[in-house]
Image (cartoon, grey):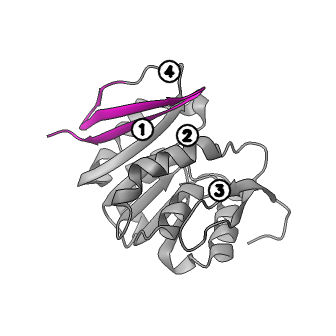
Amino acid sequence: MSNRKSCKSTNPRIITGSARGQRLEVPGRDTRPMTDRVKSALFSIINPIIIGVNVLDLYAGTGALGIECISRGAKKAVFVDKSRDAIECIHKNLAKTGFEALAEVVKGSVSRFLDEFSTFNLETQVYDIIFFTPPHNDYKEKILDGTAKLLSKKGILIAEHPSSRKTSDRVGDLEKIDERKYGITSLSFYRLST
């Protein structure tokens, strides 16, 4: 890991749990962390299902979503991002919170990760919560569709996207069960279709 100053301290923090109040580092200017307002709303919705689950944080950026889940009792989290600066900050944030043993970090594009998942030799093969939070300009339903094979039967996928973007009610094997708007940002919730 380099000693470059690729991370800067900023506002994102862990809301609750064992790492409550811990401020996280954020990679350079290309990362847009989820706002505290949206994150608080999201976790008030999913909090009842977090304890003991496996989490996949795609386009992880700071790692804030997966780390928040671990803080609230998730079993394990896998973080995926293609940016070297983001990967460095995720490692720093895991060290700061003491969660390194509960995490695996993958450097690579999300599309490559999904296409070549078996080659990564990860301990966890299926996930109960998947976060899909690409930069708003990079939201692609084709990539979202590739997550279905990694979602557990009763799992939930949360996709963040611009509120101006209309998202499909069905994306391959995924079925939208809810959508919440928070200003310019929306969250769509998907489960495997039955």
At 55% from the left and 40% from the top, the residue drawn is: 134
Range shown magenta: 168-194
Which amino acid, mark 1?
A: Ile
The mark lying in front, picked from 2 and 4, is 4
At 59% from the left and 59% from the top, the residue drawn is: 15
Q: Which residue is mark 4?
A: 165
| In-front residue for pair 71/110 | 71
Which disc, if any, is residue 143? 1
Which disc, if any, is residue 11? none
Q: Quadrant of the N terminus?
A: bottom right
Q: Which residue is mark 3?
A: 62
Mark 4 to mark 1 CA distance (whole Å): 16 Å
* Label 3 CA crowd tier, 10 Å (few <14, some 14–19, many 20+): many
Q: Which residue is mark 2?
A: 134
Please give left or right for residue 162 compared with residue 4 in the image.
left
Q: Secondary structure at mark 3?
A: loop
In x, y percent, where is residue 81?
58, 53
Mark 1 to mark 3 CA distance (whole Å): 21 Å
The mark lying in front, picked from 1 and 3, is 3
Q: In this view of the protein, can residue 132 be seen by the observer?
A: no
* Label 2 CA crowd tier, 10 Å (few <14, some 14–19, many 20+): many
Contact flag, marks 2 and 1 (Cβ < 8 Å): yes
For marks 3 and 4 on the same chain, the one whose residue lies earlier in the sequence: 3
Which amino acid, mark 2?
A: Pro
Is residue 187 part of the magenta span, yes or no?
yes
For marks 2 and 4 on the same chain, the one whose residue lies earlier in the sequence: 2
* Label 4 CA crowd tier, 10 Å (few <14, some 14–19, many 20+): few
Please give left or right for residue 108 compared with residue 155 in the image.
right
